[in-house]
Image: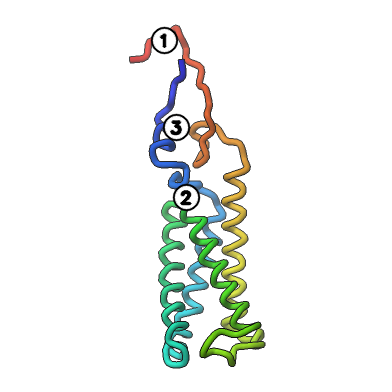
Amino acid sequence: MINTSSAHRAARAQGTALVPFRTALRWPAALGLVTTAVVHVPLVGPHLEEAPYVGCLFIALAAACLVLAGGLVLRDNLLIWAMAGFTCLLAVAAYLLSRTVGLPQIGDDIGDWADPLGITALAAESLTVLLAATAVLRTLTRPRTVGDGPRVTSARVPVDESSSAV
């Protein structure tokens, strides 16, 4: 007979993507997300005038980063970690594109690698990507047992036949 604990049932019902990790990595990752948001706020105005789509993307990035930072602090699950890592990875890719081949309406950013806000954003975004990858890979590759966090492997819990469970 298999005794399924309430933690195991809850994890199955929710899906492992929604079970909190409770890792210490969430704090520096949340800081990286907040830093990314704060760095992009002063860039919104000038970019709304120069290239409105970039200004709108900066607003969306800042809002997403703040929401994800809150999510990591309150409930750092696989879904939030993956979204945080992917969001910052997209931001890094956009930054690299804007500095190499350029983006429409902001071709003057090509080669501007020394911009302090750009360096700060790139560092914060890269840190968040690395922390997210670490948290996700650590969770997906480490064997776990029932009640040990978000990834639940099938486990057989021995039942004490001498006790009567109702």
- Residue under the image location 43 percent in, 51 percent down: 75
Residue tagged by mark 2?
A: 77
Residue type highlighted by circle 1 = Ser
**Marks 1 and 2, the one that precedes in the sequence:** 2
Q: Quadrant of residue 113?
A: bottom right
Residue tagged by mark 1?
A: 163
**Marks 1 and 3, the one that precedes in the sequence:** 3
- Residue under the image location 46 percent in, 67 percent down: 65
Screen quadrant of the C terminus? top left
Q: Would you say 12 lies left or right of 96 here?
A: left
* Distance from Cα at disc 2 to Cα at disc 3: 16 Å
Q: Mark 2 falls on what kind of element? A: loop
x and y percent of residue 120 in the render? 59, 77
Residue lying furthest left: 166
x and y percent of residue 93 in the render? 59, 72
**Local crowd at mark 1 within 10 Å, few (<14), some, or many (≥20)?**
few
